[in-house]
Image (spheres, grey):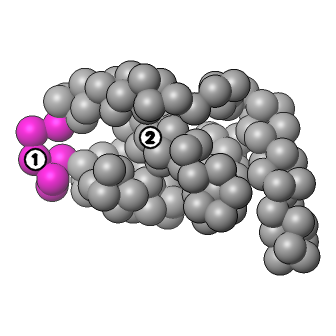
Amino acid sequence: VSALAYGSQLPESVDKCIIALSQLGEKLPDSYSEADTKVYIAQTQDMLKGFRTDQELIEYKKMRDPNKIMAMKLYARLESSLQMTKVEAQPIVTMKIVQLSLARGMSPISPLGFTYFGQL
């Protein structure tokens, strides 16, 4: 995936990431409409309501599942690649990172998702 991205083959890199994520049980929608994005934002905001303070997020459990940790790494790769290939899909990936962090625990990739989410 990285070799494709660095070799100026970003569309192929994106496709490989999506296939790998699917093999890890992570699905991305087929379309990336504004309506889809609003649904993901609402879902993510609902998940965040369970946390009263930033400190609770900071102290939240650590992600332990190796498959989910790998999925987070692939989502991070997608974040940067999508900014140059499918800008409309990037917010969905951002929210997938945040949602996976909230559902399964924080990983080193989690801050990336929260940072991008704060910019939406």
Going 82% across and 69% down the picture, which residue do you hit?
A: 5
Going 81% across and 62% down the picture, which residue do you hit?
A: 10
Task: Give the mark toward the camera: 1 or 2.
Answer: 2
Amino acid carrying mark 1 in the image: Thr
The reply to whether discs 1 and 2 touch (Cβ–Cβ < 8 Å) is no
How many marks the image carries: the answer is: 2
Q: Quadrant of the N terminus?
A: bottom right
Give the quadrant of residue 39.
Answer: top left
Whether residue 90 is visible here, answered yes or no, is yes
Give the quadrant of residue 114.
Answer: bottom left
Percent position of residue 41, x then y:
34, 32
Q: Earlier in the sequence, mark 1 or mark 2?
A: 1
Task: Kindly state the secondary structure of the residue where label 2 is placed.
Answer: helix
Instruction: Compute the Cα span from label 1 to label 2.
Output: 19 Å
Residue 54 forms part of the magenta stretch: yes
Q: Nearer the viewer, residue 49 or 115?
A: 115
Residue range highlighted in magenta: 51-56
Whether residue 40 is visible here, answered yes or no, is no
Percent position of residue 86, x then y:
65, 50
Residue under numbered circle 2: 95
Task: Kindly state the secondary structure of the residue where label 1 is placed.
Answer: loop
Amino acid carrying mark 2 in the image: Met
Percent position of residue 38, x then y:
36, 28
Residue at the left extreme of this rendering: 52
Residue 118 forms part of the magenta stretch: no
- Mark 1 closeness class: few <14, some 14–19, many ≥20 residues within 10 Å: few
* Up-down relation of residue 7 to residue 61 (above or below): below
Residue under numbered circle 1: 53
Query: Left or right: 86 with respect to 115?
Result: right
Q: Nearer the viewer, residue 93 or 56?
A: 93
